[in-house]
Amino acid sequence: MHYCEYARILLEGTNLEDKLIPLKNIEYTENLRPYELPVNPGRTSRLEFNNEQVKFPRNTSFHLEEKRGLALHFFANHELLAIEMMAAALLIYPDTTPEILQMKKGLVRTIQDEQKHLKLYMNRMKDFGIELGDFPLNDFFWRSMDKLKTPTHFHCAMAMIFESANLDFAQFYGKSFLDVEDFETAKIMDIVFQDEISHVALGVHWLNLWRRDIDLWTYFTNHLPGVMTPARSKGIHFDRSSRVRAGFDDAFLDQLEAFRDDFKVTNRKSW
Ligand SMILES: [Fe+2]
Ligand SMILES: [Fe+2]
């Protein structure tokens, strides 16, 4: 099946089975057809967006299974959104160069990881009596999708903001689960963390190629939609070593580490 057909199932399909469809025997031929981004991804009523405020649980409450389950529900939502946004990226950017098609092959491998993460979180949540859709699923990440007009914008937001922040969050919450001796969930966080390094690396790779002689920091900050700030690229504790592994150079990391802003939402205490 052509990669665009898969992408449409992932994005427009309404059931979890659509979001988790195994991606195999994929055809990669150039696609130049325009695709209009839907207002929302396909979702059965149970999985529909709902921005009712639910607070992310404090890790000091993680001795309670229901709080751990709620945290996993938030993480699972992020995985589902990543699958849909990456599928959207496969569809909305035409293959005007062989490079873009090449980039999309990497994106499909990343989607496979996100599907794996979603399944890991859902299985573990089930142990705590929670299923996807038991709590509201917010559309926070999805709302940025229509502002990501080019593959450069997409990687600046997805790899350099959302996934980069998750390098910190996955480690932070991995430790929180260890603190309450939930080794099984901690192990899942480590799997996600290791995969996330390679996902961020993919974005860094393509941006380094596309930026030419502009430095990565300037290129990154110039391609962020107005509502996003580089502060959102960091989690609770800034971990430099995983970012070195993802391919960032020292000049970029010095800028990112030193970056402060007082935008309320980004001076956050939790994911
Ligand atoms: Fe993931
Ligand atoms: Fe990821």
Image: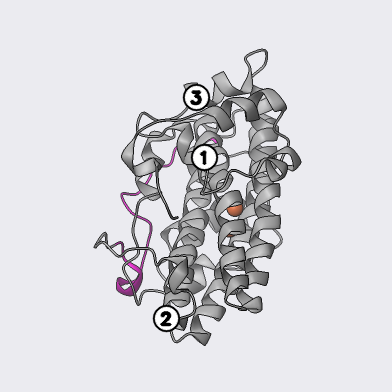
Q: Ligand 1 is in which quadrant of the figure?
A: bottom right
Residue with the mark numbered 3: 221
Q: Is residue 96 above or below residue 56?
A: above
Q: Amino acid at mark 1?
A: Ser
The overriding secondary structure of the stretch rendered in magenta is loop
Q: Amino acid at mark 3?
A: Thr
State the separation of the CA atoms marked 2 and 3.
Answer: 39 Å
State the separation of the CA atoms marked 1 and 3.
Answer: 11 Å
Q: Amino acid at mark 2?
A: Glu
Q: Give how far across and how far down residue 244 sits, in percent.
A: 73, 38
Q: At x 37% / y 39%, what residue is drawn?
A: 146
Q: Tag 3 or tag 2, which sits nearer the N-term? A: 2
Residue with the mark numbered 2: 66
Q: For the N terminus, which image quadrant?
A: bottom right
Single out the residue that lies furthest toward the left. 52
Q: Residues within 10 Å of mark 2 (few under 14, many from 20)?
A: some
Q: Which residues are magenta?
A: 32-49
Residue with the mark numbered 1: 233
135 with respect to 165 (left or right): left
Q: Give how far across and how far down residue 112 sits, in percent.
A: 64, 60
Q: Tag 3 or tag 1, which sits nearer the N-term? A: 3
